[in-house]
Amino acid sequence: MDKLYSVKEVAEILGVTEGTVRNYLTNGKIKYVKVLGNTRIKETELKRLIKPSKRRWINDEYIKCNRD
């Protein structure tokens, strides 16, 4: 089962504001689920959004690479 992330967590990982993430959700750029009324983004969806050249998942942990 995928790990679920909050809007705040996704914003921090992507380096954008929570408002931007909410706009992406509203516009359908990010798929999400509702859990007990709370918006959550699945880990597979988050991985799809991350540009491979700038960010990596290592041992199921997100890291930001400093190279371009």
Image (cartoon, rainbow, N blue to C red):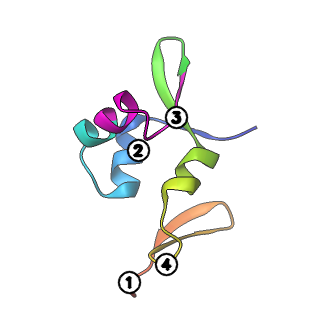
Q: Is residue 30 magenta?
A: yes
Q: Is 9 rendered above or below residue 60?
A: above
How many numbered discs, if any? 4
What residue does disc 4 label? 53
Tell me how far mark 1 sits from mark 4, CA to CA: 10 Å
Question: Which secondary structure lies at badge 1?
Answer: loop
The residue nearer to you, when weighing 58 against 45, is: 45
Image quadrant in which the C terminus is located: bottom left
Instruction: Mark 1 or mark 4: name the one nearer the start of the chain.
Output: 4
Tell me how far mark 1 sits from mark 3, CA to CA: 28 Å
The quarter of the displayed image where residue 1 is located: top right
Q: Pointers 1 and 2 in contact (CB under 8 A)?
A: no
Q: Is residue 53 magenta?
A: no
Instruction: Mark 2 or mark 4: name the one nearer the start of the chain.
Output: 2
Tell me how far mark 2 sits from mark 3, CA to CA: 15 Å
Is residue 59 rendered to the left or right of residue 53? right
Q: Residues within 10 Å of mark 3 (few under 14, many from 20)?
A: some
Name the amino acid type tagged 3.
Answer: Lys
Nearer to us: label 2 or label 4: 4
Question: Which secondary structure lies at badge 4?
Answer: loop
What residue does disc 3 label? 31
Q: Residue at x 40, y 88 (%)?
A: 67
Question: Which secondary structure lies at badge 2?
Answer: helix
Tell me how far mark 4 sits from mark 3, CA to CA: 22 Å
Q: Residue at x 36, y 32 (%)?
A: 27
What residue does disc 2 label? 9
Q: Which residues are magenta?
A: 22-33
Kindly identify which numbered label has been placed on residue 66.
1
Q: Residue at x 64, y 41 (%)?
A: 3
Instruction: Mark 1 or mark 2: name the one nearer the start of the chain.
Output: 2
Tell me how far mark 1 sits from mark 2, CA to CA: 20 Å
